[in-house]
Image: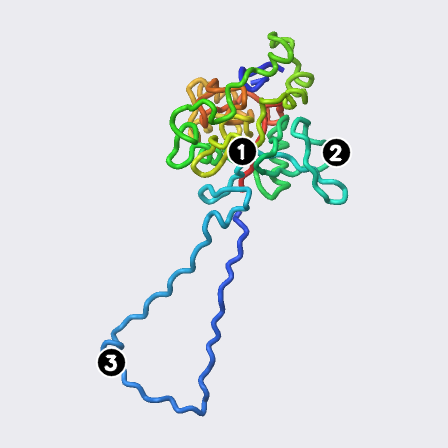
């Protein structure tokens, strides 16, 4: 399988509204009710409408590991996997290994944990579903990355070196030579050695300055992130993208979509939050592919 030039190959929210119940006690029947004369002003006065109940704050309606995004929630950090044993217990799956084929796995999101690589869009969607969430749409992902007001890099409108985990040397070249025609999909693109290499993939949230105004971290760089959309002409109406990618939308119809770039890219497929890759099937995976969930 050949390289795409960058990646190494190319609802609602559960909350309970608890209302207080007022008990209206009937007056004693033996008690005489005094006669009251209504004033003209009182007769003309209109009753005031009751104040509407306070809505829950967006932050209160999202789980702790997620941040509010319009009517939805999105994970603060890129996802890692938890594997469920026969007794129901969960243990963390090594981020440098493919998702297990013999045990169920669940998406989780936490600061300081290495995010999961080597995952396909199909597997990412399964992991989110197992966690009671779903894979983000391209529009949701783009909105969370760009923030409010929308800016290209989430943290700002101009690139700042060192803010996000991008621009590192190409690991395939470093470990397996400079001849891309010699690289093999399973042996090289999915080698565990790639994400074991120190100072390339970073733990979630390590680059503290790489966060958007909504509170989503590492959306630019670190790992590519799968979204639920598939490529096609309509994708160009949903998210910003550079002309080079827009021109390939029709012939890439049906392909999977991942966004944001990873630790060895900068602006090859777009700047910052506009980085889009549409070259691969939904079952594709390599060392650069990760994800996060929405709800």
Q: Residues within 10 Å of mark 1 (few under 14, many from 20)?
A: many
Residue furthest out toward the top: 179
- Across and down, in percent, residue 19 comes to 49, 64
Up the image or down, 267 lies above or below 86; here it is above
User: Which quarter of the rendered picture does the C terminus lie within?
Assistant: top right
Residue furthest out toward the right: 86
Q: Nearer the viewer, residue 78 or 123?
A: 78
- Across and down, in percent, residue 86 comes to 76, 42
What residue is drawn where x is 49% and y is 32%? 208
Q: Nearer the viewer, residue 52 or 236?
A: 52
Disc 3 marks which residue?
Answer: 39
Q: CA distance from mark 3 to mark 1?
A: 67 Å
What residue is drawn where x is 68% and y is 27%? 97
Q: Secondary structure at mark 1?
A: loop
User: Which quarter of the rendered picture does the N terminus lie within?
Assistant: top right
Q: CA distance from mark 2 to mark 3?
A: 80 Å
Q: Tell me which numbered mark, 3 or 1, is placed earlier along the sequence.
A: 3
- Across and down, in percent, residue 205 comes to 53, 33
| Residues under numbered marks 1 and 2 in contact, where contact means CB atoms less than 8 Å apart | no
Inspect this view and state whether residue 257 appears.
no
Mark closer to the observer (3, 1): 1
- Across and down, in percent, residue 226 comes to 55, 30
Disc 2 marks which residue?
Answer: 102
Q: Secondary structure at mark 2?
A: loop
Q: CA distance from mark 1 to mark 2?
A: 30 Å
Q: Secondary structure at mark 3?
A: loop
Disc 1 marks which residue?
Answer: 205
Up the image or down, 120 lies above or below 60; here it is above
Q: Residues within 10 Å of mark 2 (few under 14, many from 20)?
A: few
Q: Tell me which numbered mark, 1 or 2, is placed earlier along the sequence.
A: 2
């Amino acid at each position: 399988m050949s390289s795409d030039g960058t990646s190494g190959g190319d609802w609602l929210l559960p909350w309970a509204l608890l209302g207080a119940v007022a008990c209206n006690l009937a007056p004693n029947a033996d008690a005489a009710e005094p006669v009251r004369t209504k004033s003209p002003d009182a007769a003309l006065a209109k009753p005031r409408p009751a104040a509407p109940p306070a809505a829950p704050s967006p932050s209160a309606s999202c789980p702790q590991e997620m941040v509010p995004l319009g009517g939805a929630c999105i994970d603060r950090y890129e996802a890692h996997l938890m594997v469920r044993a026969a007794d129901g217990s969960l243990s963390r799956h090594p981020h440098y290994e493919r998702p297990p084929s013999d045990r169920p796995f669940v998406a989780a999101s936490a600061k300081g944990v290495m995010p999961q690589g080597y995952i396909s869009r199909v597997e990412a969607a399964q992991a989110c579903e197992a966690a009671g969430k779903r894979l983000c749409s391209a529009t949701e992902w783009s909105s969370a990355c760009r923030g409010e007001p929308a800016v290209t890099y989430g943290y700002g409108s101009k690139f700042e070196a060192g803010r996000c985990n991008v621009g590192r040397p190409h690991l395939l070249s470093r470990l397996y030579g400079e001849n891309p025609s010699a690289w093999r999909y399973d042996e090289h693109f999915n080698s565990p050695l790639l994400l074991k290499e120190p100072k390339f993939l970073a733990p979630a949230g390590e680059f503290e300055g790489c966060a958007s105004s909504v509170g989503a971290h590492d959306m630019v760089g670190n790992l590519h992130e799968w979204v639920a959309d598939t490529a096609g002409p309509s994708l160009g109406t949903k998210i910003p993208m550079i002309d080079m990618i827009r021109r390939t939308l029709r012939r890439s119809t049906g392909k999977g979509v991942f966004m944001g770039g990873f630790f060895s890219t900068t602006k090859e497929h777009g700047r910052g939050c506009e980085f889009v890759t549409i070259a691969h099937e939904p079952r594709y995976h390599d060392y650069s592919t990760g994800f996060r969930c929405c709800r």
